[in-house]
Each structure stands twice: as C-alpha cells, then as structure tokens.
Amino acid sequence: MIREAGLEALKKAGLGPGDIDGIFIGHFNGGFLRQDFSASLASLAVPEFRHTPAVRLENACATGSAAIWAALDAIESGRIKRGLVLGFEKMNTLPSHEIGQTLLRCSYVREEGETPGGFAGVFGSIAGEYFERYGDQSDALAMIAAKNHKNGTVNPYVHLRKDFGFEFCRNPSEKNPVVASPLKRSDCSMVSDGAAALVIEPNTSRSLEGPSVRWRSRAQINDFLPLSQRDRTCFEGASRAWKSALKLAELRLEELDFVETHDCFTIAELLEYEAMGLAEQGQGARGVSEGLT
C-alpha cells in the first residue's frame, strides 16, 4: 500500500524518489500490527528511499494532519525543499471485538478504557448525552450517513461504494444493527486497510499530472483528553481551530466551497457542523436537514 500510494503521488507530481528530501509517515497502529517503527517501512516499500530521512507521527484521529503539519514546518523552515507525506493503516489484522478495544487507546484509558462497545461506545455515549440535552437526532444522523454513503459512490477509492439511502440508515435492522446506542452500524466508519500520499513543495512551474492545491492557512488546537474534563457535546478545540484557520486565511466560512471533515461517527460530523460555525450549538441537525452539507 505504501509503495502504490507513494509512487502514484510522485508520478502525478512529475517527480521521482530521488527528488524527495524528507518523508513524513502518519501511522496510528496502536496494536493493529506487531511491527512498529513505521518510518523505516518507506524504504522497504521503495528501496530508493533507503537513506532519505523519514519520521513517523501519531496523533490519534489527527495522525494524518500531524504528518502534514510536520512536513510543512520542515519546508517553511528551509530545511527541506520537497516532502512526501504518507499515511497508512492496516486494521483488519485483528478480530472484530479487538478492533474496538484497540481504538480505545485514542481515548483516556484510565477512565474510558473499559467502555462497552469499544470506541463506538465512547461516541455512543456522546450521542446519548447530546440527545438528552437537545432532543433525538436520529433523523439527522441517518441523513448524514446516507449523504456520505452516496458521496462514496463517486469515489473509486472508497471501501464500500453503495448508496444505502435514508430509510436503511434510519431504521435498525439485521443488516444495520445498533452498535452502541443510539449509533447503528451505518453511523460508524468502516474498518479498512488503506494508504494515501501527497507531495508538498513550494510553488512550481513544472507540469503536473495530478491535481494540486495551495496551502492558505493551518491551525492546531488541543484540548483535554478525558471526556470528564470537558463538555462532550461540544468540540471546543475544533471550534477554536476553525476560527484560527479562517482568521489566518482571511476568509469567512460562507466563502468556502468545499469542506472535508472528520466523520468517524455521524455524531462527530454533526458536532463539527457546530464547531465550524455552520449551526449554533444544539442545532447541528440544520446543517444536513436544510441542505447546507
């Protein structure tokens, strides 16, 4: 996976392995693989990277963002000219019941490590508290799930290219059981093996095969890990990050044409609507019900 994603990114950038000055690998692992020291795997996948500096970054659900952040720092400092960012996970090495337990390492294990339902149970509890405070949001979560599955049908790289529709996502069934109340299977991201890569460099006049984007701003905000120390129905850290990034970019939210946001569970996407300012707290459902997303 590393080789395929990395070489494809280099090809689209019109570059070869010898043009890369540093490799930044985002890899959570957390016990999915016995093999650690992920930075060393780039040269096994592409032998030409044998002596290219490589580092591995892990930051739970923001692991990929952390790798990009580090690559941008290295380039902006002038230490390197071009960086290759690689992200990969291999999750299907474990039985299903162990996968949820492994992902719980992204939570505060001392307090949340025994949560029934694994990591889905953590977000199920978040959804349950949100429902208690703001009312049943099952329709909104089903609309989010249906929207995302439909979007996936036009992406050749997704795990499951199938439009399930609102009714399937809204109602529990044998094929869509409750995983961690009130979350059903369709509310949960899939367990997948995959890899992605991108090349980051200063502006170039070189002809490119693939799409390119320019970086306008970036922001990172942390928050307390234990849910007991924060309002679990509000992504305050994400809200602060959005405000900071928009300010640095000198943009308003309504000027954006496209947003790709983290949606490990549908309740997370709903809370992101509120964090980015698309809806007031407690009214995240408007983001999808009014066709804003």
Image (spheres, rainbow, N blue to C red):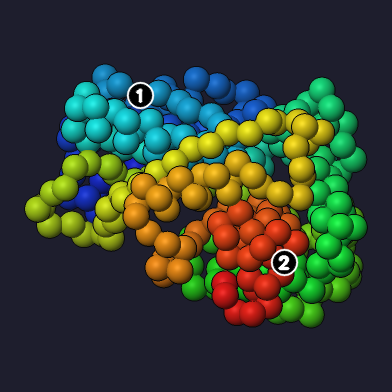
Q: Which residue is mark 1?
A: 54
Q: Earlier in the sequence, mark 2 or mark 1?
A: 1
Q: Under tag 1, what secondary structure? A: strand
Residue 264, position as x, y percentages in the image: 66, 52
Q: Which mark is residue 283?
A: 2
Quadrant of the frame with the C terminus: bottom right
For the point 46% across and 63% down, the residue is: 253
Spot occupied by residue 104 in the image (x, y as percentages of width and height) = 75, 34
Residue type at mark 1 is Ala
On the image, the x and y values in percent for residue 280 come to: 67, 63
Question: Seen in the image, is 155 located left or right of residue 228?
Answer: left
Image quadrant containing the N terminus: top left
Please tell me how many numbered marks the rendered image carries: 2
- Amino acid found under the numbered disc labelled 2: Gln
Q: Give the residue drawn at x 75%, y 62%.
A: 282
Side of 220 relative to 218 (left or right): right
- Residue 86 visible (yes or no): no
Give the image location of residue 10, x and y in percent: 26, 46
Badge 2 density bin: few <14, some 14–19, many ≥20, Cα 10 Å: some
For the residues labelled 2 and 1, the Cα–Cα distance comes to 44 Å
Foreground label between 2 and 1? 2
Residue 285 versus residue 8 in the image, above or below:
below
